[in-house]
Amino acid sequence: MIKIDNFINLFEAATRESWDRPALSDYHKTTISYRQLAERIETFDLVWKRCGLRRGDKIAINTRPSAFGASLFFAAVCKGYVAVQLYSAFTPQDTQRLVDHSDSRILYTEKRLFDGMDFEKMPQLLCVVDGSTGEVLASRGEAGEIIRSAGQLFAEARPDGLQPADFRVIRAGMDDVCAILYTSGSTGNPKGVMLTYRNFTANVQGIGRGFPFRKWENYLSLLPHAHSFGLTCDLVIPLSTGMHVTVLGVPPIPATVQEALMEVRPRLFYAVPLIFVKLVDYILGADLRSPEDQAKFNDYENHPGFCNRLNEKFMRETGGRIEAFVTGGAAIPTEVETLLVRKLKIPFVSGYGLTELAPIVSYGRVGKYIPKSCGEYLPDIMELRIDSPDPVHIAGELYIKGDVVFSGYYKNPKATAKVMKDGWFQTGDIGTVDRGNNVFLLGRSKNMILSQSGQNVYPEEIEVILNELPYVAESIVLQRGSRIVALIVPDMNALDKSGMTSETLDAVMRQNIVALNAQLPAYSAVNDFELHFEAFAKTPKGSIRRFLYK
């Protein structure tokens, strides 16, 4: 049960209280205060209303993570519009299709992306704006001129400027939809996850109380804002709390992340597991090069002093103030747990969530790490049940009910009905839950891969394209470490007819991978392939037994 106010009301209060304090920064670029953020929000609202938009109309945000993109999101949700968050890494064709599917009226994107789109095939759009320059890239009617006159509109509406008491958000219904997040940009039936004010507010309550989100302190945002993990944890909660959010906005290579952590000095750091592993290697690699030191590290239980010194160095060189390193989105590999929790003993916490839950299901507690657990689910904002006669010992599919559950897939009632059963959301994930409410995931029936940048990759969508390429009979796409690998069964009949040699086959498959990647967003590109000369094992229904090929 939600016990706090709507998150946009919390943001309104935080904005007024933090008026002249920093709100958003683009790393090593510009910073805006909460006053300037409020002025942006008011300006966007004036422009959108002048363009004829009404409450509930869609604003497509297809920018890289940035202070500007964050401003757009808060403008939409605070003034009664619906923010349609689209990955900037989607292909232009996918973005165009999703903009059209979402019925968006204005699109904020990048010129390089819009150059690959056809404005005429998005007839509901009034205007397309470059989010980095403000340039109007295309428009219909007077929308372009209205957007160009944004500054003048604000000056006329607020000749004496904006005062804290002047900033007001709408009084939104908790079950009103405020955001749509697409789970993929693929062909087929798009799944636009409709999230409500209730969903985000439940996450603010559930996550915010468990971690040190503290008013007026610093926060570093690395995660993509088109993903519910990044949107909620990197923007919604910190800005609703009055924090100063610095958006990294560049590829999270270890040197850059470490430098940013030293400058921002946050108390809390959210990232995908691979970033933590790379940070450890970057910061401590020189201390572990000798065989003697590596042996001590491997025999960590008998060398606590050595590991303590490494812990102190790692904590110091990540800013010296972090109270919790938090990850989520996928099960944590055993070697990562051993490295971070057992050897280095850093304050590491893992969680579990899904886009349809905005995203929280569970998270761990600092200092109480339970191996292989995704932490405790939150009974004050959800119910959790497992389709199993003995949920503690026998794995079953997880179902969630409560304030976090989305309102459905946009214009896709069949897909919604498939996952909603009498108010329960069918997660597609298999696991158990102990008597302390700790969730343990044993598998993902959805087969989703979490990319290095924190974006979701859906193997089946890649396989559909790959299976259409020359000499491919069937394929499986999976993750091996940090790499995405395709297992390919060649079409033996076609090979026999062609008389192709093994060397030529290898070259053809490499060409296929190049052709495949040209049709995919960069974050889901296949890095390598393996040839299998026997058909994959199948279920009686004809589905590939994927678990045999991990």
Image (cartoon, rainbow, N blue to C red):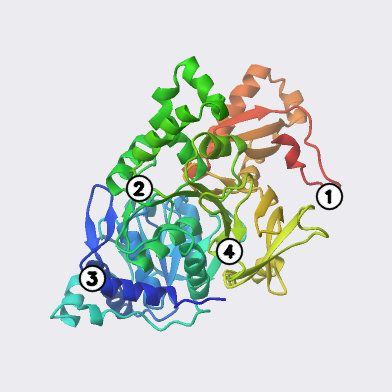
Residue that badge 3 annotates: 19
- Badge number at residue 541: 1
Q: Residues within 10 Å of mark 2 (few under 14, many from 20)?
A: some
What amino acid does circle 4 point to? Glu
What amino acid does circle 2 point to? Arg
Query: How far is disc 3 from disc 2 in space, using C-alphas?
Result: 25 Å
Marks 3/2 in contact by CB < 8 Å: the verdict is no
Counting from the top left corner in percent of width and height, residue 404 is at: 57, 69
**Label located before the other in sequence (4 or 2):** 2
Q: Is residue 247 left or right of residue 278?
A: left
**Residue at the limit of the structure toward the left, as seen here:** 160
Query: How far is disc 1 from disc 4 in space, using C-alphas?
Result: 28 Å
In the displayed structure, 99 sits above or below 261; it is below
Query: How far is disc 2 from disc 1 in space, using C-alphas?
Result: 53 Å
- Badge number at residue 356: 4
Counting from the top left corner in percent of width and height, residue 491 is at: 73, 32
Q: Residues within 10 Å of mark 1 (few under 14, many from 20)?
A: few
**Label located before the other in sequence (4 or 3):** 3
